[in-house]
Image: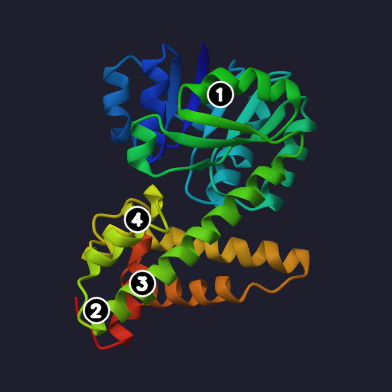
């Protein structure tokens, strides 16, 4: 197994490490080279540009922060799209708009390569533990070629058919539901605190009764303790995803009032200098508005 991996942020780095552990011959690139030092020490090769990393590769994996960065490393001056070999597969694991997937799919298809959308559910700790849930959508041959690489990074891959954009829509809908959970738990915990109930007790009761889910226990603990730093998923990225959800909804001709509320929550937090906090920090605004200081 051989691949290039582009983007070594808080998610990409542990994912690349798991590929190395699985025996993949890995070439890596990141804007900040020092992020790759540990990987290089473990046997990864460094490339000086995305195009150099992808040269001669059948699999190129990207895990970058947003749509504009994904387009830059793929189609930009030093992007890798122009050097992909025939039938090579670009595995895009970022949370991006369905429109971006369509654009990249067309660009690769014109050159005889394939585009596979494979966004993930899970935060950096899940990435490190190889516990990601991966959504895979694209041509059948691309999904088959990428399958062992995805298996090396996650606990389960959901095969979603030939249309890459479907994986992106599902990922955005899943993130939207997490946003709604952050809002509802933030409001409920604030109401409990205003009535003298310990915040963590409420989460313990819910997670052991009507909401027995890890996401309730884990996110709930952060909100109950108001432990918003260090970030596992930055609040400014939550704003990016809320924007993408509303963009997707507008294209579909539907209203999403809760997504608009969360967009405002995130925007307010970013405007007040909390963009580097964890996105559960959107709940801070709820407590502050209720007169509770952390």
- Residue 285, quarter of picture: bottom left
Residue 59: x percent and y percent?
A: 59, 21
Choose between 246 and 54: the one closer to the eye. 246
Q: Which residue is mark 4?
A: 207
For image coordinates 51% across by 61% down, the residue present is 240
Measure the alpha-carbon separation of dots 1 and 4. Answer: 45 Å
Viewer-proximal residue, 25 or 291? Answer: 291
For label 3, the residue is 186
Q: Quadrant of the C terminus?
A: bottom left
Circles 4 and 2, Cβ within 8 Å, touching? The answer is no
Crowding at dot 2, Cα within 10 Å, few <14 / some 14-19 / many 20+, comes out as some
Cα distance, mark 1 to mark 3? 44 Å
Eye-nearest disc, 3 or 4:
4
Would you identify the image quadrant in which residue 70 lies?
A: top right
**236 relative to 55 in the view: left or right:** left
Does the CB distance between marks 3 and 4 fall below 8 Å?
no
């Amino acid at each position: 197994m051989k691949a290039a991996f582009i983007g070594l942020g808080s998610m990409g780095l542990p994912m690349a490490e798991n590929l190395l552990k699985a025996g993949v011959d890995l070439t890596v690139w990141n804007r900040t080279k020092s992020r790759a030092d540990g990987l290089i020490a473990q046997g990864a090769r460094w490339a000086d540009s995305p195009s150099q990393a992808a040269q001669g590769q059948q699999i190129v994996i990207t895990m970058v922060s947003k749509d504009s960065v994904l387009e830059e490393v793929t189609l930009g001056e030093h992007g890798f799209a122009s050097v992909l070999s025939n039938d090579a597969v670009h595995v895009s694991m970022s949370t991006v708009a369905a429109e971006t997937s369509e654009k990249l799919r067309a660009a690769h298809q014109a050159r005889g390569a394939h585009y596979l959308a494979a966004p993930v559910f899970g935060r950096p700790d899940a990435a490190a533990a190889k516990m990601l849930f991966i959504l895979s959508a694209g041509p059948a041959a691309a999904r088959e070629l990428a399958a062992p690489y995805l298996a090396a990074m996650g606990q389960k891959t959901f095969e979603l058919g030939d249309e890459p954009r479907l994986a992106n829509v599902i990922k955005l809908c899943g993130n939207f539901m997490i946003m709604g959970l952050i809002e509802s738990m933030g409001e409920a915990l604030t109401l409990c605190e205003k009535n003298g109930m310990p915040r963590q007790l409420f989460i313990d009761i819910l997670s052991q009764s009507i909401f027995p889910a890890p996401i309730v226990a884990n996110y709930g603990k952060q909100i109950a303790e108001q432990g918003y730093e260090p970030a596992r998923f930055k609040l400014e990225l939550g704003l990016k995803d809320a924007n993408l959800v509303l963009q997707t909804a507008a294209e579909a001709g539907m209203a999403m009032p809760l997504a608009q509320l969360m967009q405002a929550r995130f925007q307010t937090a970013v405007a007040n200098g909390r963009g580097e906090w964890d996105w559960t920090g959107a709940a801070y605004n709820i407590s502050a508005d209720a007169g509770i200081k952390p």
